[in-house]
Amino acid sequence: MLVFDSLHSEISALIAQFLPHDGSLETAIDGLRLYRSSVPTEPVALEYKPGLAFVAQGSKIAILGTECFQYGEGEYLLTSIGLPVMARVTEASVERPHLCLLLDIDVLQLTETMNQIDNAAVASEKSQRSLSVNHLPPSLMDSCVRLLRLLETPSAIPILAPLIRKEIAYHLLTGADSVRLRHVAASESQTHRIGRAISWIKENFSTQLRIDELAAYVNMSPSSLHHHFKTITAMTPMQYQKVLRLQNARQLMLIDMIDAGAAGFRVGYESQSQFSREYTRHFGQAPMRDVAQARAQLLGDVAAATAAVAAVP
C-alpha cells in the first residue's frame, strides 16, 4: 500500500508539473496525453481511442449508450475498441484539480507482445463490453511513472519509451483486462472482426449502411454481427453510425460555424427534420440551441478556470 501511495503521489506531481494549467497536452511521447481541469465540466461528445485513461486526482464519467462508467482516483478506464461516448469531469477543484493520464494502445504491439507471452488460443470467444474500469495495480503504475519521467530527459524518449510501452502492454495482457485485450489482439476473434466493422463505419459514416454488406466484409453472418456488435459497444451498427453522424455534425457546427441543415447533409442526412429530431433526442436540445449553449459553456469554463488559477496565491 505504501508503494502504491508513493507512486500515486509521484504520478500526480508529474502530471501537475508538465501541465500546470487547465487543458490537455500532447506530450513528446507518441500516444501519451495529459489532461487537467480545476472545475467540473459539462458532458462533451468524444471519440475514445483504444487505450487507458488513468485518473490521478478527481473523478470522471463516460457514458456509452445508456451505460455509465465512473472512475476516480487510482482507477483507470480501458477502451479496447474506438467508441463514441459522452464524457465529463465530475470532481475537480483549484486545490485538487482533476488530473488524468491518457495512453493509446498500439494494437500491433499488443499482438506482438501477446504472441511472445504464449501462443495459446484466446481463452473464450464470449464477447465483452469494450469499456471497463479497474484499479491501476502498482506494477502498471510504476511503468506509467517511469514513462512520465522520460519527459524530463527528451533524448531518452526514442530509446526507452518503446520499451516501457511494451512493458505496459505486457501488464495489461496479464492483468484484469487480459481476456478483453487478447480478443482485440487475436486476428480471428469476434472482437477483432467487430473492430474492423467499426473502422469501416468510421470511414464511411456518411454513406448508407447495409448490414449484409458489412457482415460479409468482416466475414460474419448478419445476426452474429448484430449480436457481438451490441455486446461490445452497447449499440447496434445502425445506432453506432447515428451517434458518429450526430457527433460529427455537432463538431461541424461548433468549429466550422455552419448551420444545422448543412451539417446534417454533410454527415449523411437527407431530411433536415429527421436530423433535427434525432439530434434533439441525442443531445437533449435542438441543434442550434445546443451549439449556442455549448459555446457559452465553453467560454464560461475558460473564464472560470482562468479566474480560479489567478486567485491561487
Image: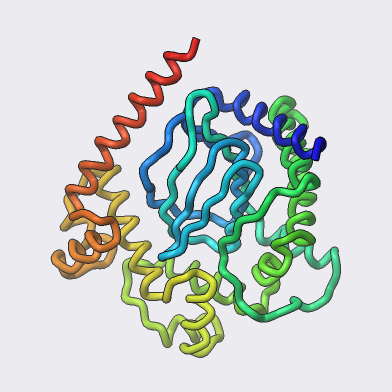
Where on the picture, by quarter, is residue 206?
bottom left
Res 157 quadrant in image: top right
Q: Is residue 147 left or right of residue 258?
A: right
Outermost residue to the left: 273
Q: Is residue 23 above or below residue 270?
A: above
What colour scheme does the image use? rainbow
Q: Give the image quarter of residue 213.
A: bottom left
Left/right of residue 49 with respect to residue 238 in the rendered view: right
The relative height of residue 40 versus residue 272 in the rendered view (above or below) is above
Measuring from the top left, give residue 144's x and y in whole percent. Answer: 72, 41
Q: Position of residue 55 (x, y in %)?
A: 60, 42
Which of the two residues, 273 or 113, is positioned nearer the viewer here? 273
Q: Residue at x 55, y 70 (%)?
A: 195
* Residue at image coords 25%, 56%: 284
State left or right for residue 205 relative to residue 289: right
- Image height of 259 relative to 246, above or below: above
User: Which residue is drawn at the image coordinates 24% and 65% (left, top)?
Assistant: 278
Residue 173 visible: yes
Q: Residue 89, relative to residue 155: is it above or below?
A: below
Residue occupying image coordinates x 60% and y 26%: 16
Q: Position of residue 39 (x, y in %)?
A: 43, 32
Answer yes or no: is residue 160 visible.
no
